Image (cartoon, helix red, strand yellow):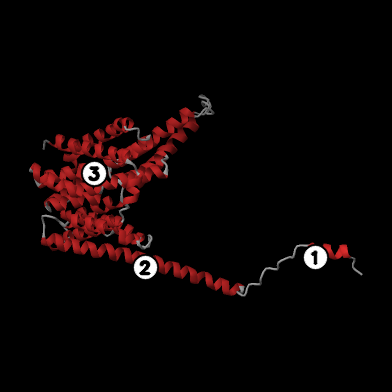
Amino acid sequence: MTTAPARERQLARPTRLVPPVSTVSGASAMRAVPAVRTVSAARAASGMSGGLAFAGAIGLAATAVGMACPVIGAPVVAVVGGALLSPLARRWGGALQPGLDVARVRLSRVSVAALGAQLSLGEVADVGLASLPVMLATLAACLAGAALLGRCLRVGHDLRVLIGVGTAICGASAIAATSPAIRARNADVAYAVSTIFVFNVAAALVFPPLGHALGLSPEAFGLFAGTAVNDMSSVVAAASAYDPAAVQQAVVVKLVRTLMIIPIVLALGALVRDREASSDPHAKPRRQPDHQARRRLAAARRQLAAARRAVRLVPGFLIAFVVVAAANSAGLLPGASHEPLRLGAMILIAVALAAIGLATDVAALRRTGYRPLLLGLLLWATVSLTSLAVAGAV
């Protein structure tokens, strides 16, 4: 017989809750996993096609407007139209972003490769060599200005390096290649890309009227755009809006300028490693007599690794451009194909610029603050004035 205190203790014990038995069997759960993956893949494919279709529609409309009104040009209409419609694109919560990324990056690179059909390897070499003095002068002026002006504006070291390299060489591609070498923070990378983006769009809008005001020839404007604009899509946009004859010159100059990223990234990486080694209090000097062979082997391995990194930094679209130009030089491309390839390249660049406009995030640009934007503006002006001065246009 249970006593009253024992009965009270039994009632005071916490009740154990038995978890409900799942009504879904293991086999059913395993079958559900592929179904979820299928739905995710379908959504990704829908976003890819939706982003490409959206940018493609704007690009085709901009091309039609550009043909009807050459004074405005398809590139300006594409980037402005995309920016105006960017709030509509953002309502999908990033679902269109994969397609916009493909249009912005891959289609612009395909268009650059197609432009190689308009030139021979001899012309590429002549234009590239002739542009070297202007290119090296703008590179030196921009990097020196980033160091001095960035320090005066109290912009962080890594951020001013990224903005300087992006402005001097090839925009977001240079920033992406440089950020691992200097171990930059993600926030600095985002700020630098946002700053560079502003002046890419500004160049496509401002440089063609400026070139007409200065009375530049198509060749002179191509040299100006190729050395003063930092992103390939904006280079093609500015040159095509100015004069179709300026596009080939601008593209070749920009491609040669893009190669400057290789020595810059390698030099910055070496500086960072030296700085970290000198600031490491636990670093010990190596013994000289016993480790000569090991040091030589380690140095050879580092040089080989640096050479491999340098090869990987060469953009694929640059190689494709040279291959197409070589095919044209060898007579493998019939003359009748030149105009369709040029028109196709212009349509693709309009689609790429529409994607750039659609991806515009005004709120992110506001969050960068005025100091990085002011530094970007000053460097943009420095590169532009240096290019015009060295080329003898001012």
Q: Circle 2: is it few (<14), some (14-19), or many (20+) Cα within 10 Å?
A: some
Instruction: Give the camera-side residue of 279 and 311.
Output: 279
Q: Nearer the viewer, mark 2 or mark 3?
A: 2
- Quick one: which residue is furthest to the left in this view? 215
User: Quadrant where the N terminus lies?
Assistant: bottom right
Image side of residue 21 versus residue 345, left or right: right
Q: Circle 3: is it few (<14), some (14-19), or many (20+) Cα within 10 Å?
A: many
In three-dimensional space, the C-alpha distance between marks 1 and 3, rounded to whole angstroms, equals: 85 Å
In three-dimensional space, the C-alpha distance between marks 2 and 1, rounded to whole angstroms, equals: 59 Å
**Residue appearing at x 15%, y 63% in the figure:** 64
**Residue bearing mark 1:** 11
The image quarter in which residue 381 lies: top left
**Residue bearing mark 2:** 46
Q: Nearer the viewer, mark 2 or mark 1?
A: 1
Question: What amino acid type should be assigned to the residue bearing mark 2?
Answer: Ser
Image side of residue 135 versus residue 88, left or right: left
- The answer to whether residue 381 of the structure is visible from this angle is yes
Q: Determine whether the residue tagged by mark 1 lies in a helix, strand or loop.
A: helix
Question: What amino acid type should be assigned to the residue bearing mark 1?
Answer: Leu
Q: Is residue 261 above or below residue 96?
A: above
